Amino acid sequence: MESTLQTIIFIAPICAVLFAIYLTKSILKHSEGSDKMKEIAGAIQQGAKAFLHTEYMMLSVFALVVGAAIFVFIDGSQLLFVKTETGGSGGTALSFFLGAFTSALAGYIGMWIATRSAVRTTEAAKENLSPALRIAFQSGTVLGLLVVGLGLAGVSILYYFFESPTPIFGFSFGASAIALFARVGGGIFTKAADVGADLVGKVEQGIPEDDPRNPAVIADNVGDNVGDVAGMGADLYESYVGSIIAAIALAATTTFVGETAVLAAMLPIAIAAIGIIASIIGTFFVNTNDETKLNWALLKGLLISTVLLILGSVWLVHATGVQVEGKHQYGVLIAIVAGSSLGVIIGLITEWYTSDHKRHARWIAEQSKTGPATNIIAGISVGLESTALPLLCVVAAIFITHEFAGLYGIAIGAVGMLATLGISLGVDAYGPVADNAGGIAEMSECPPEVRERTDKLDAAGNTTAAIGKGFAIGSAALTSLALFATYAQTLQARGIPFDGLDILEVNVMIGLFLGGIVTYMFGAMTMKAVGRSANHMVNEVRRQFKEIPGLMDGTGKPDYAQCVTIATKGALREMIFPGLLAVAAPITVGCLLGFEALGGMLAGALLSGVLLAIFMANAGGAWDNAKKYIEGGAHGGKGTETHKAAVVGDTVGDPFKDTSGPSMNILLKLMCTVSLVFIPLIAQFV
Amino acid sequence: MESTLQTIIFIAPICAVLFAIYLTKSILKHSEGSDKMKEIAGAIQQGAKAFLHTEYMMLSVFALVVGAAIFVFIDGSQLLFVKTETGGSGGTALSFFLGAFTSALAGYIGMWIATRSAVRTTEAAKENLSPALRIAFQSGTVLGLLVVGLGLAGVSILYYFFESPTPIFGFSFGASAIALFARVGGGIFTKAADVGADLVGKVEQGIPEDDPRNPAVIADNVGDNVGDVAGMGADLYESYVGSIIAAIALAATTTFVGETAVLAAMLPIAIAAIGIIASIIGTFFVNTNDETKLNWALLKGLLISTVLLILGSVWLVHATGVQVEGKHQYGVLIAIVAGSSLGVIIGLITEWYTSDHKRHARWIAEQSKTGPATNIIAGISVGLESTALPLLCVVAAIFITHEFAGLYGIAIGAVGMLATLGISLGVDAYGPVADNAGGIAEMSECPPEVRERTDKLDAAGNTTAAIGKGFAIGSAALTSLALFATYAQTLQARGIPFDGLDILEVNVMIGLFLGGIVTYMFGAMTMKAVGRSANHMVNEVRRQFKEIPGLMDGTGKPDYAQCVTIATKGALREMIFPGLLAVAAPITVGCLLGFEALGGMLAGALLSGVLLAIFMANAGGAWDNAKKYIEGGAHGGKGTETHKAAVVGDTVGDPFKDTSGPSMNILLKLMCTVSLVFIPLIAQFV
């Protein structure tokens, strides 16, 4: 059995990468269209490249410092203090670098292909809907497959090499570090560019959205990729590897029926491998020419992959016979099914709360009739309320997975949820490509039917984006929970004195509060960061409109690159403090107050962070769609006071849903991985 | 020593009540002014009475049902299932009724005197500032002294009678039930009336604030009393008795040095008694004719009382020799000092985050220059950020009180914080009286210097209100924590199988999430309730302006009573579901998932609820003062777009700071007391 699993695990990532290469080649075969289109697409590509180069430069320094710290404090101390651990010197640091590098690589290639696919999607949309859909979706799939391929390859190679989960925590930490840069920095970048483009271009100068005269327009389009391609990809990469590593680690501390402990540790990797195959097969079903069935085409692929994954899991669990001691024979299978259902259900609930076809967003639109204040109050109410159902689903998933397979089950549930990431991320990352395609159509003055077609693709992308956001939060919650359980189990397994996490112990209670404080501080910091960064952008765009002669009548050329540089610098500068908070808080609390307080802190951050993340993402999404609903003609449509009120909500919602909310996902996981990695360092203090 | 304490405990509440009667008489001696003033004040008094009568009718039914349920399920089952407990049959139900009755009585008299003092304050303001200040402050002090007098008398009589803390939990629950009605219902009442008066009167009809032609103007003035007198009073009454009862209960489960267990149980009552005397002495120092020193006059009284309390505590702790086993000799004293400092410090932090003299509110005003969206984002950022310092203080207080006196120390710290409530509530409840006095001056067309004087009183009231809100949240947090510890200790003391609250246990983790969900749902419900209730009010005010002939030119008379009725009905209808949630959620979770999940739920609600409460109260306060800062002339003052943007923030902040935020205080404590009281019922299910 072991060798069968090894074969599957060996083949799947290779398939993923090969299929991604095949998709890339087939995308690049398509025409880039007119010179004007090439020029615009080129500017976006340049901007994206400029951002990534600056980011990766900064990142390399960060990674070197952190990697060195890990090498000195962790790998060194593991040799000295926890001699029983395998994978001693250099293991964690090496894993850290590999995790950071693979995540960055996946993000880079994902951005590279996304910025190249957008213009080809526009060109294809001149012909018909179906080829345009295919290019945009294939571009997303390249990212999805790279994420799962590189992630799985990395984890399995390291696990094969070290034969212990401990050094692999570094891999997860590396992925988290990149995710922090990509998600937080990306979120700040995209909103600063967005606000700059809208406020000066649309409001002050009165030129339409995506007008090439607007100096921030390229930065705005780059921002979509930075936030929704690289950011989302890194976020889910982190969840993906985090859940697998947590499952491997928990397999080591769980008692199984029969001689299946080794198989139990391989199982999460095998499930992920099956998920890759299932995802690849699923992509072939995403295809339609019927514009009313765009959503269905995307969902169809996802559903087929999920069914295939479950079938594969039935075989896997049956063949390996992995069963947690004292739990049901097919308990592990039930955990997988519960996890993979959870992702879909949370996605659907998110859509219900945010879609402009559903009652919540429409109620917000209704409340906009009495002005911006009632619009804001309505959005906040909807956001607060919308936390209940998704979290009840998380609670149900925790209950079921644990009931049937213990703590191991929770991690396996998370793996089940994320196993089809190859296609679900593809569905997700399709959105910004469609969005960019629309922007390019506008800027290159394509015929109106092209823009209409890309708008339809974009609208379908909005729905899938809502589902994707819910999925990202749900997976972050479940992964954090699995990592949190891993933290406690690891302490016990290493024989570190650890009293458990009884809330009645004052240290745990204090940790709980500190965790809550960190999430609120992080939320405040990221909200303020967007404001400051947007201010710089607004000033730069104003300056260009004032100083560049002939900009408005089209004889002068705006300096797109300068706007990209400002957004980049702003994003990277503004993410330092939230980033430091996320990394330093757990280490400080651990060293000063001990492992119990740190555990309490992780739990407090998990609770408060998940609530805030759902609240912010859904309030933001609902405000956005309330505005779109009015723009579609409801309550008098554009230009009315009602619409103005809805725009206020949308603007407030932007940093909610695109910066602070998604960043919270990273915070939760990052705090857990930091705690895991730095256990040996903290152990020297307490 | 015991008899000395008994004497102090016996005398102090009597002093409080006698002094309150003396203050009431001296207030009533003052003139009510002109017939016009009497008429307006009479309408407010009528409105307040009408609200309270309707509320108390509904409340009686509620109290009878709950009391009967307690009698059947708790008092009955205590006899049957926990035979070792003293104070069996009828004890808890009786305590419940007494707690509810005394809280209602304090609120009723407090409202009665507040609505009678306002008009006398106006009349006194014709003469000078000092007599006006004295009347308004004395009115607040009547409420403060009744709260501490009735609260302490109730707890000590019951404890003397039952000799066990268990049935007295019912007293705390009774107080909580009234607090729920007063705080949640009152919060909905006051904001619905406020919005109705402002939106139709000020905006649609263009008449000034407090114009007697506005049908909602009386309801608006009644609302100030309902929310800030009765609501705040009931909130703090609950904290006051809750902290004392928790300390008594924890004394029973703590090991003390020497034979001091009995004294340790009496100590919280004795501290509260000393606090009453200290408060009464402090009131004599609140006096000034210098308008620049109004704040200082109020704070002076508070500080002197605090110093006296600490001196009294030094003697108490020294004389009783109460010392927790393994802790410092004067540990209990240190806990008292830590608790009483915490209240002041959190108050000052709240003021720093919300005052229009400080940078946060001014930054929000600055951000209003770019419109309502940036105003909202700024307010939310400030609110999120403002949670950190107060909670760090709470964490520090937990750490210190526990370090020096264990869990008992946490409860004693809460008692220390609340012991000077007689005067601190007086300082707080002075605000709405000054506010109403201004309204009456406006409506009765007093000379402008009268309004100027009442405005100065009102401005000082705003500062103390900010401090009071911080104090209310801080005390709710510490009291909930003490009650939470009591919950766990009580389970262990009664020999109920209870595994502790290890977060790694799935049930505890699930409870943690459920607790978080409850707070967000509760927030959403109360926000929406204000919206719905305000809608009804707006319609009624519009109807009156349309249907009553001659209303605008002063020949027709508005139907004030109808507006009060609508606000009352709205408030009471809308509070049913949040109230049910608060009571039913802990019982349901306890019965279905057991004591561990319920404990997790309490902790989750505590964490998430305190964060939300501080966030909402401070964001709301900061928005309010940002608007006031602009109205004072900054950034162009009234009538500018900046001012309009700030008004949006203020309107959003209203339900934040006056309804949802303060209601969260009640939710936290109520969930704890419900859990404590229903332990015997839940024990039958698990």
Image (spheres, coloured by chain):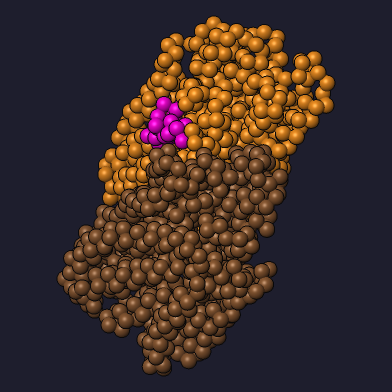
Chain colours: A orange, B brown
- Above or below, A16 against B130 in this view is above
- Residue A113 visible in image: no
Magenta stretch encompasses residue B215: no
Q: Quadrant of the C terminus of chain A?
A: bottom right
Magenta segment = A344-367
Image coordinates of residue A534 in percent, x first then y, are 68, 37
In-front residue for pair B436/B368: B436
In-front residue for pair A380/B406: A380
Say left or right for A301 vs B132.
left
In terms of image quadrants, where is residue B72? bottom left
Name the residue at 34% across, 38% down: A338
Name the residue at 57% across, 60% down: B446
Say left or right for A217 vs A540.
left
- Above or below, A285 against B275 in this view is above
Image coordinates of residue B163 in percent, x first then y, are 29, 82
- Above or below, A262 against B602 in this view is above
Magenta stretch secondary structure, dominant? helix
Say left or right for A552 vs B302.
right
In terms of image quadrants, where is residue A317? top left
Give the residue at the far top of this rendering: A127
Name the residue at 27% across, 80% down: B162
Q: Give the mark count.
A: 0
Q: Quadrant of the N terminus of chain A?
A: top left
Magenta stretch encompasses residue A348: yes
In-front residue for pair B618/A183: B618
- Residue A341 visible in image: yes
Name the residue at 45% across, 90% down: B320
Image coordinates of residue B79 in percent, x first then y, are 18, 73
Give the residue at the far front of this rendering: B555
Image coordinates of residue A490 in percent, x first then y, are 47, 54
